[in-house]
Image (cartoon, grey):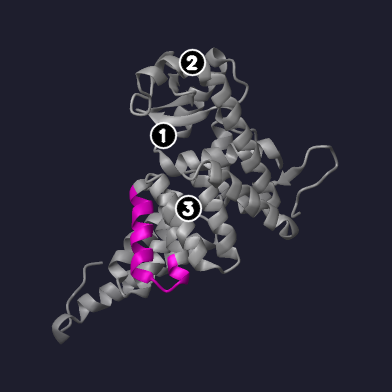
Amino acid sequence: MGGANRDTDVTRYCRQDVLRILHLHARQLAAWERAGLISANEHYTFEDLGQLRTLRDLQATTRISAKSIRASVDAMQRVGGMRNPLMEASAVRRGSRLAFRQGGALFDPLTQQLAFDFDTLGGRQLSLARAGAQDSSRQAAEMQERFLRAVKMEENPATIPAAIEIYESILAAKPSHAPALINLGTIHYNLREYEAAEELYRRATVADPDYALAFFDLGNVLDEMQQLDEATRAYQKAVTLVPQYADAHYNLALAYERQGHRRRALRHWLAYVRLDPTGPWSSHARDQARKILNAEKLSIVSRGGRPVKVAG
């Protein structure tokens, strides 16, 4: 299984495995390590993998900084008695900070304020919220464990059918489980079953309209299906939700170039270079931007068939 080893009783994943499994850039993992949200290691446990997935999903659905996430996590550890709040509770955005949802209640650990989800709780349900908190937390933890087990099974081609069964069982219990929809969609995508993947990705965008990763993956499968206009709209939505989403800028630039919209592509090539300034993909983006700028300069020089002096 890739770089995973079993020199102990705990399966561990090497750094490159983690980057590949979660579709992360090395710079993003390094940023979370600098913020103290995950320990800097060359090998990661299965629990680490789950925490990194949660961080990735938070990045795709909120604009909260790593520093603010760290402050909320630290506060929840202190006042909530949790060892790992990102795994033991459901983190949601509340203003510029994170709150943690359990049993129909939202708790902001920085202000130590408790609030209820009035949109989903009626009067009688409100009175029962605290009584059901422990059971709800246990169910959420069990679903998270099943989800992570499926993630692990995806790494071995022989156990992918079992992973599919687990994801389907999660969706049977919770049809709006966006991460399960995305992961199951990606399995179908890798199997070149594009129509099935498209359906699952679209369901994920409906289940969580603020989930940029869902729109990015939808764009990828639509691109494979030669539906370039729709793919472009999906990538546009991803970068609108998360302007720092480097990969979405890259794919959107490619889509614009294929449609002949080079000036539109230029903006996103430059955005990618700014967000990911090193490495082969950045070099390609920089080259593409340079070609467009040079072509634009030539078009100005020859405007109307007459030479035009260009400053610089």
Dot 2 lies on which element? helix
- The answer to whether 190 appears left or right of 300 in the picture is right
Q: Position of residue 214 (x, y in %)?
A: 45, 52
Number of marks present in the image shown: 3
Mark 2 or mark 1: whose residue is earlier in sequence: 1
Front-lying residue, 132 or 309: 132
Q: Position of residue 288 (x, y in %)?
A: 41, 69
Please tell me in which quadrant of the rendered image residue 127 appears.
Answer: top left
Mark 3 or mark 2: whose residue is earlier in sequence: 2
Q: Write down the residue under mark 2.
A: 130
Residue located 37% across and 70% down the image: 228
Please tell me in which quadrant of the rendered image residue 80 appears.
Answer: top right
Please tell me in which quadrant of the rendered image residue 156 appears.
Answer: bottom right
Residue located 70% across and 51% down the image: 153
Q: Which residues are magenta?
A: 222-240
> Counting other residues with Cα less than 10 Å from the Cα at mark 1, is it few (<14), some (14-19), or many (20 or more)?
some
Q: Write down the residue under mark 3.
A: 276
Dot 3 lies on which element? loop
Circle on res. 254: none
Q: Amino acid at mark 2?
A: Arg
Tell me the distance, in whole angstroms, between the alpha carbons under discs 1 and 3: 19 Å
Dot 1 lies on which element? loop
Residue located 46% across and 18% down the image: 129
Q: Position of residue 84 (x, y in %)?
A: 61, 26
- Considering only vertical position in the picture, is 168 above or below 158? above
Q: Which mark is nearer the camera, 2 or 1?
A: 2
Q: Is residue 228 magenta?
A: yes
Q: Are marks 3 and 2 in contact (CB under 8 Å)?
A: no
Circle on res. 64: 1
Quadrant in which the C terminus is drawn: bottom left
Q: Amino acid at mark 3?
A: Asp
> Counting other residues with Cα less than 10 Å from the Cα at mark 3, is it few (<14), some (14-19), or many (20 or more)?
many
